Amino acid sequence: MTFALRYLREHMRLLLLELLFAAVFGIVFWLYRLPLSAVLYPAVICALLGSIFLFNSMYKAYKKHKLLTRLADLRGDVLKNELPIPAAAEESVYQSVIQKLCMEMQSMKEQHTETSQEMIDYFTIWVHQIKTPIASMRLNLEAEDTRLSQRLKSDLLHIEHYVEMVLTYLKMGAESTDYVFAPVSLDKIIRENLRKLRGDFIIKKLKLDYELVKETVISDEKWLSFVIEQLLSNALKYTGQGAIAIFSEAPKTLCIRDTGIGIAPQDLPRIFERGYTGVNGRRDKHASGLGLFLCREICKRLGAEISVTSRIEEGTTVKIDLSLMQNPMND
């Protein structure tokens, strides 16, 4: 009904013009004292024929409207091949413009994909190259067991983590990512990350409360490990004293709780936004605002849900709900 009313409003000028023509004939017949039935009868026939033509035109316009509505949801590369046969010269021009725009968009998309892939390839090589001197420096520091060497090893670990964060950020924008889904032991990932971060626990003299999770999920081990490492790094970064706890809740929810400085209530709704650092980030001039953003994006792609609760000066709890994880290869 809405389409019919809109169609009638769009053609109202034509309908009024036809009524005006009939009125002119009626007035002329009346002035010449001719019988009005002579004009009324053909006017009724013309009105019936006009109604048939109007409804037929409305039906064709409705079909075209439905087709165009469906085409509006298609991608540009598909749209240009699905356009209807033009019924008028003006439609043909419009379709030519649309096809040209689709071709330009496809070309820009291909150029963007190529540029992005080149950038990812470059940083992938760069990451592997920079890991060599980092590993060499760590190996040299292994011979020493001083407070300075522990601090330097911790700093090297953070450098390596930030390098991986850059590469992960670039890969998140790629159309395809190297996900490999398989059964993954959460405890295995947690222990590996705790081993990497043990130096920070020692330096900051933080207590670790770790309860075995005893859960296996279908996920990508590398990407899930990045999320857990990032969350543990955040907990260590913003906890000056106290403890960091790792435990699980039903059903298949991994929890990481710290006794750190907490997150301001006004910042909580925005902590997963790209580049948002909040009050804590303004205190720490080196915060990038990418860590939690990447965690959320990765969790989305893995089929998990991440949430955060926090209180100022009491601590923060991050939960990763893994119960909805499924292997996309089986979908």
Image: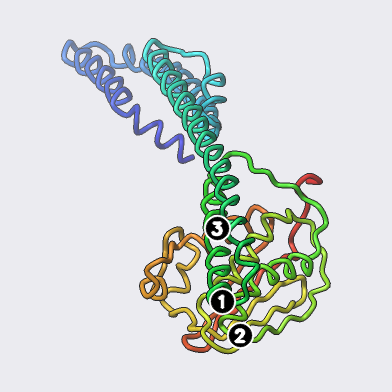
Q: How many marks?
A: 3
Kindly indicate whether the residue at mark 2 contacts the one at mark 3 (C-beta within 8 angstroms): no
What's the coloring here? rainbow
Kindly indicate whether the residue at mark 2 contacts the one at mark 1 (C-beta within 8 angstroms): yes
Image coords of residue 179 (percent x, y): 70, 47
**Secondary structure under badge 2?**
loop
Image coords of residue 197 (percent x, y): 63, 71
| C-alpha separation, residue under disc 1 versus residue under disc 2 | 8 Å
Q: Which residue is mark 2?
A: 206
| Label number found at residue 236 | 1
Q: Residue at x 56, y 82 (%)?
A: 204
| Crowd around label 2: few <14 · some 14–19 · many ≥20 (10 Å) | some
| In front of the other: 271 or 277 | 277
Image coords of residue 78 (percent x, y): 57, 25
**Secondary structure under badge 1?**
helix
Residue type (three-letter) at the residue carrying disc 3:
Leu
Residue type (three-letter) at the residue carrying disc 1:
Leu
When the figure is inspected, residue 291 is found, relative to residue 201, above or below; the finding is: above
| C-alpha separation, residue under disc 3 versus residue under disc 1 | 18 Å
**Secondary structure under badge 3?**
helix
| Crowd around label 3: few <14 · some 14–19 · many ≥20 (10 Å) | many
| Label number found at residue 5 | none
Q: Quadrant of residue 165?
A: bottom right
Q: Residue at x 64, y 52 (%)?
A: 301
Q: Which residue is mark 3?
A: 294
Q: Residue at x 55, y 58 (%)?
A: 294
N-term-proximal mark, 1 vs 2 = 2
When the figure is inspected, residue 294 is found, relative to residue 280, above or below; the finding is: above
| In front of the other: 67 or 256 | 256
